[in-house]
Image (spheres, rainbow, N blue to C red):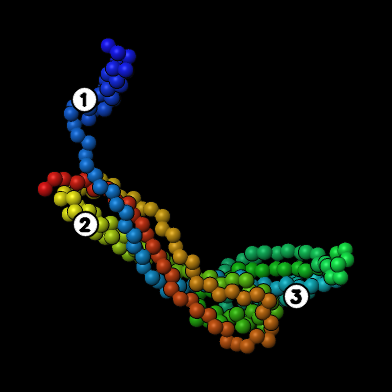
Amino acid sequence: MPRLSIAAATLMGLLAAASPAFADGVKMPHIITLSGHGEVRATPDVAFVTSGVLSQGTTAADALAANTKAMTDLFAALKAAGIEDKDVQTSNFSVQPRYDFSNGQAPKLVGYDVSNTVTVKIKKIDEMGALLDKLVQSGSNQITGISFDVSKPEQATDEARKLAVADAQRKAKVYAEAMGVVLGNVVQISEGSAVQPPMPMVRATMMKADAAPPVPVAAGEQTLAADVNVIWEINQP
């Protein structure tokens, strides 16, 4: 027997021994795999704002003293606005030298900058505009970002999951009808990852203390999404 034929026979023998489908003549099931996507729009009910103070001084100690006083006023403003301590977290603190690069000369040290920022969780979005004004009036000259979120997304996410399954079923029925087959039992279902669109955001930096109130804020809506992958058996009609 030629060498190629012997090798092929050996391979078929191994496959038959290893696979019940070959040994017993059982056919592999015919399946169809499709994905579904679902989205639900929800109104955010919580917000996060990052606010702080940038202070300057001829020495690091001077800049730090000025910054500490301003941040103390900022914390007092947050407490007066009803923000709980657990909802305020320091997000950045830095001390950096400041140089003068003018006139094409070698850099000259002219002072120091101290920056201290906190991230604040706001549970009453309708009061955010007034809070931003209070922060600026208390001495905050840095507001680097505002983001929104849904505090309890489970119900909306579950609805998105149902819509994703319905989407997969709709596609499967279309394909089954086009191929002239019948959908059988569901073999497997798994949840994939869904990319959430960027949340609405308002940004402002180096705000002046005399900024005119009220501060306009728009929370918009947030998309909660789900993706599923479903496998069905397919049968002949």
Q: Is residue 84 visible?
A: no
Residue plotted at (29% across, 15% down): 6
Q: CA distance from mark 2 to mark 3?
A: 67 Å
**Which residue carries the number 1 mark?**
23
Tell me which corner region of the image, top left, top right, bottom left or bottom right, holds residue 57: bottom right
Q: Amino acid at mark 1?
A: Ala
The crowding category of the residue bearing disc 2, from other C-alpha atoms within 10 Å (few below 14, some 14 to 19, many at least 20), is: few
Residue plotted at (50% across, 79% down): 218
Pinpoint residue 7: horizontal percent, then vertical percent: 32, 18
The numbered dot on residue 179 is none
Label 2 vs 3, first from the N-terminus: 3
Tell me which corner region of the image, top left, top right, bottom left or bottom right, holds residue 160: bottom left
Residue plotted at (65% across, 85% down): 211
Pinpoint residue 23: horizontal percent, then vertical percent: 21, 25
Considering the image in quadrants, where does the N terminus appear? top left
Residue 229 lies left or right of residue 223; in this view the side is left
**Which residue carries the number 3 mark?**
69
Residue ranking furthest to the front: 2
Q: Secondary structure at mark 1?
A: helix
Q: Nearer the viewer, mark 2 or mark 1?
A: 2
Pinpoint residue 208: horizontal percent, then vertical percent: 69, 82
Q: Secondary structure at mark 2?
A: helix
Q: Amino acid at mark 2?
A: Val
The numbered dot on residue 174 is 2
Q: Nearer the viewer, residue 86 or 207?
A: 207
Q: Nearer the viewer, residue 87 or 198?
A: 198
Pinpoint residue 107: horizontal percent, then vertical percent: 85, 64
